[in-house]
Image: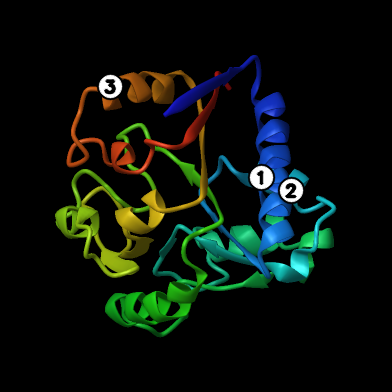
């Protein structure tokens, strides 16, 4: 894991967007297409705003979330909604979006469909992850009953998971899928999460799931 610290969040967001665009361009130079898997939540929005204007062949880029809440696509907590509104605009509107959840599906149905849909996108070309104060990433939560299965090397591509700390069921990419990405960036903001990074270094993946995927990652951090 490589930790890069920034003097402020704005600089970090611009740098991460530029790094992702460069990574995608590099991939497209030697492959017919590139896959970009991104996190949801509040942190990546500014990265998406900058990245959407990047000058690259977006028609050859397939975009999908690391995880998704089992909510309608227009719901305020939907990662698909965030991605469509903040990333798939401007030049990036030409990219192909692959959802992890479709309204009306059970979590298990959504996970099976997502596994089939995304298997051909692996390995992920460029991965953008976040991390919570509890050291979760994607929907790999320390308190999830399904965490052990999601950490297993033979887990399906996508899994239905629950967490007592979360209000809805979720679909998440398994740890081995995240770990297998060609390039990984982890976006972290705030003092509490900086402290969580240090705690995670000393803990096993069952207690700090982020450690199951960050060995070859660049972790980008700014105070706020």
Across and down, in percent, residue 49 comes to 74, 47
Residue located beneath label 1 in the image: 20
Locate the C terminus by quadrant.
top right
> Where, by quadrant of the figure, is residue 111 drawn?
bottom left
Across and down, in percent, residue 109 comes to 32, 83
Residue located beneath label 3 in the image: 199
> Where, by quadrant of the figure, is residue 216 drawn?
top left
Distance from the alpha carbon under mark 1 to that under mark 2: 8 Å
Secondary element at tag 1: helix
**In the visual, does 67 lie left or right of 183?**
left
Residue 46 in sight: no
In the rendered structure, which disc, 1 or 2, sits on the residue that comes first in sequence? Answer: 1
**What is the crowding at mark 2: few (fewer than 14 residues within 10 Å), some, or many (at least 20)?**
many
Structure colour scheme: rainbow
Is there a contact, CB below 8 Å, between mark 1 and mark 2? yes
**What is the crowding at mark 1: few (fewer than 14 residues within 10 Å), some, or many (at least 20)?**
many
Across and down, in percent, residue 37 comes to 53, 57
């Amino acid at each position: 894991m490589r930790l890069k610290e920034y003097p402020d969040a704005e600089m970090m967001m611009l740098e991460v967007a530029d790094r992702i665009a460069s990574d995608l361009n590099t991939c497209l130079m030697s492959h017919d297409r590139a896959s970009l898997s991104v996190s949801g939540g509040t942190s990546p929005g500014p990265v998406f705003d900058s990245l959407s204007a990047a000058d690259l062949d977006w028609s050859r880029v397939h975009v999908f979330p690391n995880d998704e809440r089992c909510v309608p696509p227009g719901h305020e907590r939907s990662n698909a909604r965030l991605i469509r509104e903040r990333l798939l605009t401007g030049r990036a509107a030409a990219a192909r979006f692959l959802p992890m959840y479709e309204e009306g599906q059970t979590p298990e149905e959504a996970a099976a469909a997502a596994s089939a849909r995304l298997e051909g996108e692996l390995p992920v070309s460029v991965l953008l992850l976040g991390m919570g104060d509890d050291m979760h990433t994607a929907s790999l939560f320390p308190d999830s009953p399904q965490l052990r299965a999601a950490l297993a090397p033979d887990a399906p591509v996508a899994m239905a998971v629950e967490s007592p700390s979360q209000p809805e069921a979720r679909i998440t990419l398994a740890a081995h899928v995240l770990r297998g990405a060609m390039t990984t960036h982890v976006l972290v903001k705030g003092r509490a999460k900086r402290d969580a990074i240090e705690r995670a270094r000393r803990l096993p993946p069952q207690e700090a799931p982020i450690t199951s995927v960050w060995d070859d990652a660049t972790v980008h951090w700014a105070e706020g």
